[in-house]
Structures are given as structure tokens and as C-alpha cells.
């Protein structure tokens, strides 16, 4: 099947890309075995299902398109500067990722840290609380 180029002349994105992202998320969420103490954190109803498309959740996890979230609650903001180019808004906000700061960021990343590359807003307060509770468990 031949696809027409976009107005810019570039070929359109392959139709499989969203499916690949979903497969990646499914593999990461489903990657814990039944004997893993954190297995329940990665189930089908896990709050992490929105995070794993861009973020790694494992201790010393692999590079993805966004910073690793292991130990993020209480960690300094913009802690992985060696490999990630944070927005000026986030760099200037300073401090650490408290539950309150994470709640404000997840509600509207662009308003919290202008120029933020995170483009997912979690508008439901209960969902944000579930995500933050989940993230707080990702520590030694």
C-alpha cells in the first residue's frame, strides 16, 4: 500500500507507531513475575501504565525519552542533568519532588514548568494521587 506524503513532503508516520508504544508499555507493565514483591504495582490497572511509555521505573533503569522515575518522590528536581535536557521552567523551579509538587506538575506540566517536554496532563485528582502513591513505592 502506497501512502501519500504529507504537505511538508515528508512521508507520514507509520501506522504501527502507536501500537509499538502500547506494546512497549504492556511489556514493561507485565514484566514482573508473580514472586516479585512489586508485581502488584505493574498490573493491568496500574497507575504506571501512562508513565512507562516515556519513563523507566526500575532502579538504574534504561534510558527512555524521559527521566527514570525510581526514587523520584523526595529527589531533587532535574536530577539527571547528565543525559536529559530539562526545560528552563523546571530548572528554575528548584527544590525536590514532594507529593504536592508532583501533584501540581502532573495536573499541568506546561503551567508548572514552562517549556516542559511532558505533554500529558492528569486532570483527575484521584488519578494523580494513585500515580504519586505508586511512585512513592519505587524506592529501596
Image (cartoon, grey):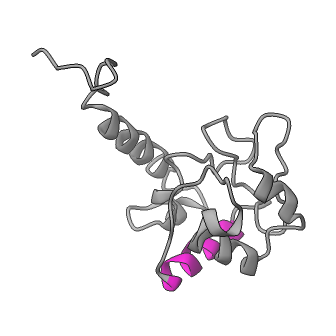
Q: Does residue 87 appear left or right of residue 26 in this picture?
A: right
Asked if residue 134 lies in the magenta stretch, the reply is: yes
Name the one closer to the observer, 76 or 29: 76
Residue 67: give x, y in percent of width and height. 70, 46
Q: Is residue 13 above or below residue 28?
A: above
Q: Residue at x 40, y 68 (%)?
A: 45
**Image-based side of 75 in relation to 39, left or right:** right
Task: Kindly identify the residue that appears in the image at 66 percent across and 48 percent down.
Answer: 58
How many badges with numbers are in the image? 0
Single out the residue that lies furthest toward the top. Answer: 2
Extreme residue in the bottom direction: 126
**Residue 76 appearing in the image:** no
Residue with the most extreme left position: 1
Q: Is residue 126 visible?
A: yes
Locate residue 116, reporting x and y percent: 66, 54
Above or below, comparing residue 29 to residue 100 in the picture: above
Q: Is residue 36 magenta?
A: no
**40 w.r.t. 29: above or below:** below
**Viewer-proximal residue, 73 or 41?**
73
Pinpoint residue 129: horizontal percent, then vertical percent: 58, 81
- Residue closer to the observer: 17 or 42: 17
Read off the magenta span. 125-137
Q: Residue at x 54, y 64 (%)?
A: 41
Quarter of the image for residue 118 reads bottom right
The answer to whether 29 appears left or right of 100 in the picture is: left
Query: In which quadrant of the rendered image does the N terminus lie?
Result: top left
Relative vertical location of residue 20 with respect to residue 45 in this rendering, above or below: above
Question: What is the x, y in percent for residue 102?
Answer: 69, 72
Q: Which image quadrant: the C terminus?
A: bottom right
Residue furthest toward the front?
7
Secondary structure mostly seen in magenta is helix
Amino acid at each position: 500500500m502506497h501512502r501519500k506524503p504529507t504537505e511538508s513532503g515528508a512521508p507520514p508516520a507509520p501506522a504501527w507507531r502507536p501500537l509499538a508504544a502500547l506494546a512497549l508499555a504492556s511489556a514493561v507493565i507485565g514484566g514482573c513475575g508473580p514472586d516479585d514483591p512489586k508485581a502488584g504495582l505493574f498490573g493491568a490497572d496500574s497507575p504506571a501504565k501512562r508513565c512507562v511509555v516515556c519513563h523507566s521505573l526500575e532502579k538504574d533503569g534504561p534510558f527512555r525519552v524521559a527521566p527514570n522515575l525510581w526514587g523520584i518522590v523526595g529527589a531533587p528536581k532535574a536530577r539527571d542533568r547528565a543525559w536529559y535536557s530539562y526545560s528552563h521552567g523546571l530548572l528554575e523551579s528548584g527544590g525536590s519532588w514532594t507529593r504536592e509538587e508532583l501533584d501540581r506538575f502532573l495536573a499541568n506540566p506546561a503551567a508548572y514548568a514552562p517549556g516542559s517536554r511532558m505533554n500529558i496532563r492528569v486532570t483527575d485528582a484521584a488519578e494523580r494521587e494513585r500515580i504519586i502513591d505508586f511512585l512513592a513505592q519505587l524506592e529501596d
